[in-house]
């Protein structure tokens, strides 16, 4: 089944709701980075959280989410757009870590990423188009990624929010080799001038007790079934505004890779030509590799060389 994200309003506009099934995108991110166990789970929670953040406005929006912890995973970066496209990478994607410890006694089926993520910061940049950006930063509070993004929304953007993202692993083992089986998330936010804070509080209580993780365990085929299984009667009437397909997408290209080489400068490129006669650029997000031979590097070096001015 393809991934899907639905934007909704709750109780005739008291709150907004975003619900997502992101399994194909999470699987593809983990596959490209050869990630398993805690690393795969971090990519699943991260891609889902980024997508939930990117679909909060009615206009086109792009969000860069960074969870920069000092744990073995080394930090997570997610690039998501309101169109449902997402890409992500970890600094240490091959780390083999088991996320088997339960987060709380009330949610024993939920796996913990706290020691894998560590302490640090959550940094969010919203690109609203037309050169308008907004950025904010908060401390990592638990290392569970969704908890930390929820904290960011409340502390930095000052919006009453309840957010949960999770994934389940196929045959998780003590050596951290489980792959992603299913991934999804839910975000509920109060709207200004309404009593939506009570709705958010009720949703947060359910989600923090592991309702999303248990719902994902039923393998719901649609976002509607995920929502019913996770929150049930915790929400008043829900009206779906639109639905969007979710997929892993990276816009990198050979042209962009070549452009990145020009940033090295003419002198560094000349040394590269003399020493190696070739270069390789690997995209952090999708791991696509672009090779450049000596002739191509010389053309790039010429482009990077500033034109000489008239004699003084």
Image (cartoon, grey):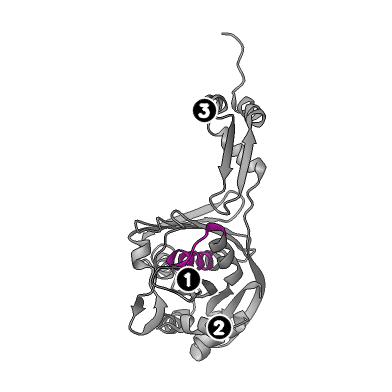
Which of these two is toward me, 301 or 10?
301
Q: Judge depth for marks 2 and 3 and give the one in front.
A: 3
With respect to residue 291, does 6 lie above or below? below
Upstream in sequence: badge 1 or badge 2 = 1
Compute the Cα span from label 2 to label 3: 54 Å
Disc 2 marks which residue?
Answer: 227
With respect to residue 120, does 38 lie above or below? below
Disc 1 residue crowd, few under 14, some 14–19, many 20+, Cα 10 Å? many
Q: Position of residue 136 (x, y in %)?
A: 43, 56
Compute the Cα span from label 1 to label 3: 42 Å
Residue 18 seen in the current view: yes
Q: Judge depth for marks 1 and 3 and give the one in front.
A: 1
With respect to residue 98, does 14 lie above or below? below
Residue at image point 64% right, 79% down: 240
Which of these two is toward me, 163 or 85?
85
Disc 1 marks which residue?
Answer: 178
Q: Judge depth for marks 1 and 2 and give the one in front.
A: 1
**Rendering quarter of residue 29:** bottom right
Q: Position of residue 236 (x, y in %)?
A: 53, 88
Q: Position of residue 235 (x, y in %)?
A: 51, 86
């Amino acid at each position: 089944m393809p991934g899907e994200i639905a934007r909704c309003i709750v109780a005739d506009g008291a709150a907004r709701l975003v619900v997502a099934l992101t399994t194909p995108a999470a699987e593809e991110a983990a596959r490209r980075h050869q990630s398993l166990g805690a690393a795969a789970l971090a990519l699943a929670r991260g891609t889902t959280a980024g997508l939930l953040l990117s679909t909060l406005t009615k206009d086109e929006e792009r969000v860069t989410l960074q969870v920069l912890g000092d744990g073995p995973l080394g930090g997570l970066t997610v690039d998501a757009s309101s169109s449902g496209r997402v890409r992500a990478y970890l600094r240490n994607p091959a780390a083999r870590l088991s996320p088997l410890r339960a987060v709380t006694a009330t949610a024993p089926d939920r796996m913990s990423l706290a020691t894998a993520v560590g302490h640090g910061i959550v940094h969010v940049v919203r690109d609203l188009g037309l050169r308008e950006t907004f950025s904010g930063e908060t401390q990592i509070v638990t290392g569970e990624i969704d908890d930390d993004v929820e904290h960011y929304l409340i502390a930095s953007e000052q919006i009453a929010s309840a957010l949960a993202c999770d994934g389940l692993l196929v045959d998780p083992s003590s050596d951290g080799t489980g792959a992603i089986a299913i991934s999804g998330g839910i975000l509920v936010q109060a709207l200004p001038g309404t009593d939506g804070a009570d709705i958010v509080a009720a949703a947060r209580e359910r989600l923090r007790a592991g309702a999303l993780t248990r719902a994902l365990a039923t393998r719901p085929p649609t976002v509607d079934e995920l929502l019913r299984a996770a929150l049930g009667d915790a929400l008043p009437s829900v009206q779906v505004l639109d639905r969007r397909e979710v997929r892993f997408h990276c816009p990198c290209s050979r042209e962009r890779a070549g452009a990145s080489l020009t940033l090295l400068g003419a002198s560094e490129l000349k040394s590269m030509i003399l020493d190696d006669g070739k270069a390789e650029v690997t995209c952090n997000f999708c791991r696509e590799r672009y090779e450049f031979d000596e002739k191509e590097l010389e053309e790039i070096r010429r482009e990077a060389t500033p034109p000489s001015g008239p004699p003084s």
